[in-house]
Amino acid sequence: MMDKDLLNGIRVADLTHYRSGPSGTSLLGGLGADVVKVEAVQRIDGFRVFNTLDPKDPHFYEMGSYFNGCNTNKRGLTLDLNSTKGKEQFFKLIKKSDVVIDNFSTHVMDKLDLGYERLKEINPELIMVSMTCFGQTGPWRDYVGFGYVFDQIGGASAVTGYQDGPPAHISAASDVVSGIMAVYAIVLALEERERSGQGQHIDLSQVETLAFLMGPNIIECQTAGNIQSRMGNKHPIFAPHNAYPCEGEDEWVTISVESDQQWSALAMAMGKAEWISDERFATSLSRKNNEHDLDEAISKWTRGQKKRTVMELVQSLGIASGAVLNGMELLDDPHLKERNMHKKLKRKYTGEHHYPQFPIHFSNGICEQRRAAPTLGQDNEEILADLLGLTSQEIEDLRKEKVIGTHPL
Amino acid sequence: MATLEALRVLDISTGISGPFCAKLLADSGADTIKIEDPAGGNDQHTSPLYVFLNQNKRGISVDITSRPGQEIFKQLVAKSDVVIESFQPGTMEELGLGYSDLAAVNPGIILLSVTEFGQTGPYRHYKSDHLTISALGGWSFCFGESDREPLQAGFPFMYYMAGTYGAIGVLSAIRGRREDGKGQHVDVSAQEACLNVLAYPQLLEQYNCPSPVRGFAVSMQTFYVEATDGWIALNHLSAIDWENLCALIGAFHLAEDPTLLYDIERKRAILPEFMRIASEWAKDKTQNEAFQAAQELRVPAGIPYTAKDMLNCSQLNARNFFAQVSQPGLGDFYQPRNPFKSMSWRTDRQPAPDIGQNNEEVLGNIGLQPEELRRLRNAGVI
């Protein structure tokens, strides 16, 4: 059987920057779409300068692991969208694209005269995704935000953190929620276009995408009148249910017991048969009531052991348990290795590294890391000549006028 | 008309990932038939989670461990496009309902298996829950405080992600099917969904960057201070944000040196002073007053909203984010409508079904006569 490029023939003009949009468009590229990342030498993707070790490196904007992590599977084009000539090439790109996606603040695209109504004149079947903080409408439409704000207003912060601690953020991972939800919006809109021939403008508020996931809590606060509190790693009914320290520095293993039978099996394995009838620990309810003592007791048992040893033993009892893996351990994890979850990509300036793969595996399709993140303006010639039909003289002129380039100004 | 109205989905999954995936497809218009074990009971069917995950689905009950149940299931497969399952790997094959069995009945069928660890690999039979996935998927190590235990997120984050990846997988496979009419088996893992929400910790080390340190305040980009009625979060990302933030709380001197922003150690040194001034600034304001004042100065502030706060949020309400829903057994309430605004969604919202609620209608459509249905019911097959 041939492995299919499932999004073969789909072209995406990608104006997104930082993490929320790029993490999604990287997946579209992994599925076989031609993703053209558009930056400008006047305004590069701000994520390029995050996490660069040496600001004096002449190519500092190529060195960051965050940018290189979430911009795989794209071609790189620079265009100054403030200039008439840059706009002219962008309109030509839009004519040959199926999707355009941006994550600017609400007014930016309109100010550039690149709003949906304008782009639709050029390509009536265009699918446009605008990822904003709070959406295109409403009293807060122009308010500012980034990942942490989505975590907070979207409801994740209030329910996340230690039981005895303040609200936490979810590391701005709501960026990825929005990015991946934008991909669903796009594959769904492609189906709509297949069916009705219609394109559309998708208004994605990154706060709302996260707030959507709080649906059950939102229902519960009305039907039961309770507001979910922060629970750390704890379970509302069962215990033990936590991360426990193991041998070594900052080594941990989780154990999730969900029945009295599981507790009996665990107690036996720990050599503490007496705990099965110990009134502090005998039932789910008593274990919850004495959870602090319970966690202390289990920590005493785990502390002298390797996390994987505990995990394997507890799993052999049919109880959920996981070693807390750090970055390098993810690379070496036997399970992820067998499933080819990291792939070596070579990139100019930074060299060869192992990048995480996507979680979708097709029996007859490809979803994988195909190419490293583009250097700034990496594919200018190829795109402008082959796709947009410019002569080498015309390309040279654009370069001289700084409409395109490969170094930030 | 919603986009996926021509699509039929059989949802035999349990837990969160699979049902959430089927929910996205159902809300996009797919005729989604939830198939449950007739012996399963109706207890959980009015829980907020169950209701949220299963609206807009029709419900039938079929015992697919029985031979007649398997035959019914295959008849449904013949008239469907997608099957979503979340059993332990190998279970569907043991029931004679593996991908090749289903493809023999309907070559176009797309089987999505959305599980904890995927269909292959040494952990595929591991027991798991959200805490386990967060540990083995690399989330927990980076999350929590450095001197305390690592933490999971406070909602089933990784399962929602796995479900969303699943829905993307299904629609990509539908697209691929147009070429040759052939369906396929799609394998999605929650552990790997988790791997994909991380901020690339495995790349940091390869790039010779300092290893990530666990700690909510490590990035020093968000500070929680107490307003009169709860926490307010003062966040900043860029140098301009920092300048605006210092201006907001009247700590102009802290913004004088722009190199401070990217020097974590020096920033940590001024933290007590910053927090003292910020707390003083916030202490006589409500959360909303502080938030509005901050946003006026273009400081990306936030409030850690509870479910109730979200329901009262003027922005969400102005955008008609909540739909009013009536669910038998649970009552009337408001809930989030959709994760983004698009013409692709269904505009109505049907209550989550009871077990076997649509047996007659769905099984009648594949040609089962009332008498046969009665016999199957008596035999416990439906």
Image (cartoon, coloured by chain):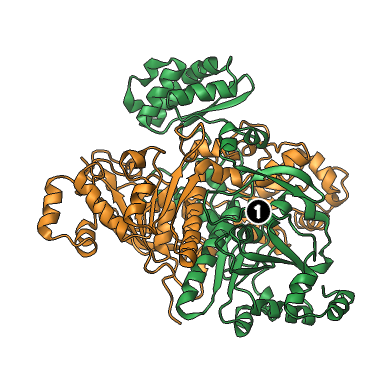
Direction from residue B351 to residue B245 in the image, left or right: left
Residue A362 or residue B84, whichever sits in front: B84
Residue at image position (63%, 74%) is B80
Position in image of residue A67 (x %, y %)? 36, 48
User: Which lettered chain is shown in green?
Assistant: B
Whether A309 is drawn above or below B249: the answer is: below
Residue behind mark 1: B348
Residue B189 or residue B293, whichever sits in front: B293
Query: What colour is chain A?
Result: orange
Residue at image position (34%, 41%) is A46
Position in image of residue B105 (x %, y %)? 63, 84
Residue A42 or residue B271, whichever sits in front: A42
* Callout 1 amino acid: Asp
Label 1 Cα crowd, 10 Å radius (few <14 / some 14-19 / many 20+): few
| SS state under label 1 | loop
Q: Quadrant of residue B114?
A: bottom right
- Please say whether residue B232 is visible from this viewpoint: yes
Direction from residue B248 to residue B23 in the image, left or right: right
